[in-house]
Image (tube, rainbow, N blue to C red):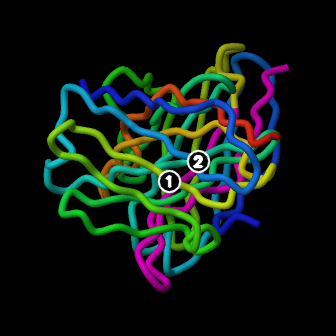
Amino acid sequence: QVQLQESGPGLVKPSETLSLTCAVSDGSVSSGGYYWSWIRQSPGKGLEWIGYIYYSGNTNYNPSLKSRVTISVDTSKNQFSLRLSSVTAADTAVYYCARGSFRFGADYWGQGTLVTVSS
Amino acid sequence: QSVLTQPPSVSAAPGQKVTISCSGSSSNIENNYVSWYQHVPGTAPKLLIYENNKRPSGIPDRFSGSKSGTSATLGITGLQTGDEADYYCGTWDSSLTVNWVFGGGTKLTVL
């Protein structure tokens, strides 16, 4: 069973860059057919897809966040990462990493990590 | 505003049946697989349905999914208090690039 675990600072100052990492175990980020994704849920709101990185390294981002988002992968460590720049209070959310595919949707999720943007 | 439209809330009594709709378009639901998720705040969302109507191992057959055209539906029978959660539909959208989209979520209350 694939397991994902998010890690990173729980508090980020406004205008700075949010950085999170998702460690993958019992599965490989190099496996074909999977889209390694970041998803968030802001307080009182629904799930919002941030973006994904394909095993080949191709990325795609939510158009509303595209100018501030970078997702990268480190195959040697079997993990992928999220960077969100110029954060504001509106970026306060629980951030989830997940494995996606065309057939299964998002079948495995991390437990989520709360990131608060505050000075 | 979400690309996929769900009712904000539904409710029913224990033992009853409920359905949750998810409306989209030809760029998403009509031409891609739909999946459904159960989310209890503070926990990881759980995949309930994939490929429109298939259940992962361990998901009881009280949960069912269907799709017709640009809409999809999640059905839950024999409601239990433990089913109280937020439910989301999700699919791929290929209107410009290939993006993942979620519905706005539906809060299920078991009265």
The magenta region covers: B86-111
What x and y, as percent, mark residue A32? 14, 55
Q: Nearer the viewer, residue B16 or A92?
A: A92
Split into 4 quadrants, where in the image is the C terminus of chain A? top right
- Horizontal relation, residue B24 to residue A29: left or right: right
Which chain contains the residue that carries disc 1?
Answer: A
Residue A25, compared with residue A38, is above or below; it is above
Q: Where does label 2 land, which residue?
A: A18
Q: Main secondary structure of the magenta part?
A: strand
Q: Nearer the viewer, residue B75 or A30?
A: A30
Most extreme residue toward the right is: B111
* Residue at the spot 78% in from the left edge and 22% down from the top edge: B110
- Numbered marks: total: 2
* Residue at the spot 51% in from the left edge and 73% down from the top edge: B69
Per the image, label 2 sits on a secondary structure element best described as: strand
- Horizontal relation, residue B108 to residue B60: left or right: right
* Residue at the spot 41% in from the left edge and 39% down from the top edge: A21
